Amino acid sequence: MAEKITIAPAKGNWVVRAAGAVLGESRRALALSEGDHPDVIYFPREDISMALFDRSETTSHCPHKGEARHYNLAAKSGTVTDAAWSYEDPKPEVAEIKGYLAFYGDKVAVEQV
């Protein structure tokens, strides 16, 4: 693996907010650290209001994690395109993130509370 990836439980309670609403809250989030990039917090889907998300047509590929599927957020103020992503069939080295969602920080707020 070209970049070292580590996955560990994210300490404390984490929340995702957008358009004035709480989209989810979790004490079971994971922190993924990859190279020089800031940690990315992954939330279990069970802790997110998935009724607010629709699968988008967007996919992306990471050579270290696999194929990511993106999700649009249906907010009262309108659709937030590709607000989240998920590795639904990640590579074995990062299997812990299967069934988890991560969010783009420029589209929603991810905060430790």
Image (spheres, rainbow, N blue to C red):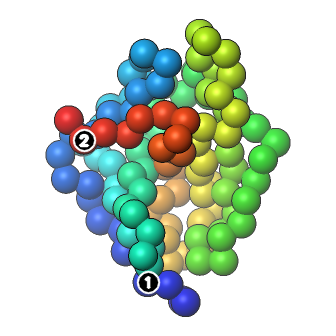
Question: Picture coordinates of residue 74 (x, y %)?
Answer: 64, 20
Q: Do the CB atoms of the residues marked 1 and 2 lie less than 8 Å apart?
A: no
Q: Residue furthest bottom?
A: 2
Residue toward you, 79 or 59: 79
**Residue at (34, 55) in percent of width and height:** 30
Q: Position of residue 70 (x, y in %)?
A: 68, 45
Q: Residue lying furthest right in this view?
A: 57
Residue position for label 1? 4
The residue drawn where x is 19% and y is 53% is 11
> The residue tagged with tag 2: helix, strand or loop?
strand
Is 62 drawn above or below residue 24 in the view shown?
below
In the displayed structure, 7 sits above or below 5; it is above
Q: Quadrant of the N terminus?
A: bottom right
Disc tally is 2
Q: Is residue 107 left or right of residue 9?
A: right
Which quadrant, please, contains the C terminus? top left
* Real-space Cα separation, disc 1 to disc 2, in angstroms: 24 Å
> Quick check: can you spot residue 97?
yes
Where is residue 84? Give x, y as percent: 58, 42
Instruction: Bin the neighbour count of mark 2 within 10 Å (Cα to Cα): few under 14, some 14-19, many 20 and up.
Output: some
In this rendered view, identify the residue nearer to me: 81 or 94.
Answer: 81
Query: Foreground: 90 or 63?
Result: 63
Q: Is residue 51 left or right of residue 112?
A: right
Percent across and percent down for residue 64 are 59, 77
Which residue bears the numbered disc 2?
112
Residue at image position (47%, 25%) is 18
Categorize mark 1 by other alpha carbons within 10 Å: few (<14), some (14-19), many (20+).
Answer: few
Q: Amino acid at mark 2?
A: Gln
